[in-house]
Image (spheres, grey):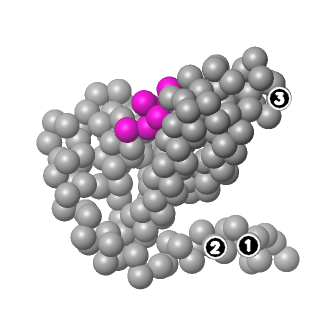
Amino acid sequence: MSSVEHPNALVRWTLRLEDAAALDGAIGAIEPHVTRLFGSGARGRLLRGEWLGHALHPLMTDVVVGTWLSAAVLDTLGGKDSADAAQRLVATGLLAAGPTAWTGWAEWSHVPVRDKRVGLVHASSNGVAIALYAASWLARRRGDQGSGRALSLAGFTVSGVGAYLGGHLSEAKKVSSRHPAFEGD
């Protein structure tokens, strides 16, 4: 039997998420606001990366994920001398998270409902990760490096869920803006 006939647990969970009509109420409540703020007009075209020829969101996520991954490496392997650098990396990721989210909401505003369901959980996971990283930065600023490291690693774990779902949308579902010239491939 093939893996198509028997998908693994993560694939089954993702498919159930796509079918989770229970999320449709939340989608209906926020969709007009998201579209107005991030998805329509010149602002929406800019945030979707139409000027670039493809989605801007995946490029932006690299900054956030990269800085937070680097902080996690320093927190686990760097020792005391790397605490300041890890704090700066956490802060850099936090500063990039807002514009990155805006580009994601711009993409979300133009996708079918099954993808909106996954996107909503993706955004929610990332929101929790941002809150954990903000708490990490505050703890580090107070001098509580142990709590800062723990909160950062928790944030990195939660952001992994968001990254998985974002990867599902961009790779498996091919959800992203792109120039029409790329449609024939």
Residue for badge 3? 77
Give the mark, 3 or 2, whose residue is nearer the N terminus: 2
Question: Is disc 2 in contact with disc 1, using a CB cutoff of under 8 Å?
Answer: yes
Is residue 120 visible in this depiction of the protein?
A: yes
Q: Residues within 10 Å of mark 3 (few under 14, many from 20)?
A: few
| Kind of residue sitting beneath label 2 | Trp
As measured in the structure, the alpha-carbon distance from the residue carrying label 3 to the one carrying label 1 is 32 Å
Q: Residue at x 51, y 37 (%)?
A: 138
Residues 163 and 125: in front is: 125
Q: Is residue 135 magenta?
A: no
Which residues, given as a range, are shown in magenta? 92-98
Residue ID at (63%, 46%): 151
Residue that numbered label 2 is attached to: 13
Name the image quarter holding residue 112.
bottom left
Taking the spot 50% from the left edge, 72% from the top edge, the residue there is 18
The quadrant in which residue 78 appears is: top right
Q: Element at badge 3?
A: helix
Secondary-structure class at tag 1: helix
Q: Which residue is mark 1?
A: 9
The alpha-carbon separation of the residues under discs 3 and 2 comes to 33 Å
Circle 3/circle 2 CB separation < 8 Å: no
Q: Which is nearer the eye, 166 or 110?
A: 166
Query: Within 10 angstroms of label 2, few (less than 14), some, or many (20 or more) residues?
Result: few
The quadrant the N terminus occupies is: bottom right
